[in-house]
Amino acid sequence: MLPASIDQTLALLEAQQYFADRETATVLYLALRMQRPLFLEGEPGVGKTALAQAIAATLGTRLLRLQCYEGLDASSALYEWDYPRQIMALRLAEARGERPEAQSLYHDDFLLKRPLLEALLPDPAAPGVPRVLLIDEIDRADEPFEAFLLEVLSEYQVSIPEIGTLRAERPPLILVTSNRTREVHDALKRRCLYQWMGYPSRERELQIVAARAPEAATALQHRVVSVIHRLRTLDLYKAPGIAEAIDWARALAALGTTELDPQSVRDTLGVLLKYQDDLARVDGPTIAELLAAPEPAR
């Protein structure tokens, strides 16, 4: 069901173990009510993709995901014709002595639907519910692909030369994410509501870790979140995100760790940091400083 208020949006997301701040819940609620795409920008690992997964689960529909990459084109994102089946149908018709018209080979039976096209069609498993489409990491795609998306984002329709224009009966909820590795064109942003997503507060991240890594002791969860927040103040190439915080708490619990000490941190740094320069930066003295810092009052 669609949330009836911002507070209900927060509650429904929390039921999916996604702990949003009020600003994010507000812009998501508006995107649903105004039937507008939502552009989410922020560092990797702050919960942009997880938000799309949570709202799809809340609405009871399958998440459609288009992962962007350099060289992505319309045939990979929108549709392709099933040429082998078309050729087979043509040969079968010829064997029967028939001469099929060209348009008979261009209909739904031979259409391979990709995420963009599928998002414009009703979900048979969830009638009356908007589809949820995640266009993930648009900053990895080429600029011409951004221009191709404008018709979908503004009109909720696509043009297929052999068939014509297909328009969504019910506009889908489209979430576009960017890690800001390059600037996305203003024309795309203007068609969307916008939300910058930063790292969560200590309190909210503790909620997330407690929900996603319940096997870790409460005291350990607090220490994990505190150390990660201090790590993010260092000059790292890639600071650990929320996913790394959850993984670290789970890894420490799997090792039977109940208290953080320099050895346990050093042994599990590869769960948090994914670049050699960052691993070298967090050396023995740095780990000692991270652990020696006073814990904030609970």
Image: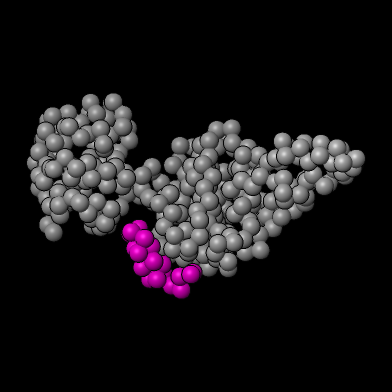
Q: How is the structure coloured here? A: one colour
Span shown in magenta: 1-20
Q: Which residue is drawn at 48% across and 63% down?
A: 60
Quadrant of res 201: bottom left
Q: Determine if the magenta segment contains residue 189.
A: no
Q: Residue furthest front?
A: 96
Q: Is residue 276 left or right of residue 114?
A: left
Q: In this view, does 261 lie to the left or right of 40?
A: left
Rendering coords of residue 253 (x, y %) = 18, 45
Does residue 194 sit above or below 236 in this rendering? below
Rendering coords of residue 142 (x, y %) = 58, 35
Does residue 39 sit above or below 235 in this rendering? below
Q: Residue at x 9, y 41 (%)?
A: 292
Rendering coords of residue 191 (x, y %) = 58, 54
Quadrant of res 236: top left
Residue 98 or 128: which is nearer the viewer? 98
Q: Residue at x 53, y 35 (%)?
A: 69
Rendering coords of residue 19 (x, y %) = 33, 59
Quadrant of res 251: top left
Residue 47 visible at all: yes
Instruction: Give the number of marks.
Output: 0
Q: Is residue 187 left or right of residue 51?
A: right
Q: In this view, does 197 lie to the left or right of 115?
A: left
- Give the position of the C terminus as an image quadrant: bottom left
Q: Determine if the magenta segment contains residue 14.
A: yes
Q: Residue at x 36, y 68 (%)?
A: 11
Residue 30 or 50: which is nearer the viewer? 50
Residue 226 visible at all: no
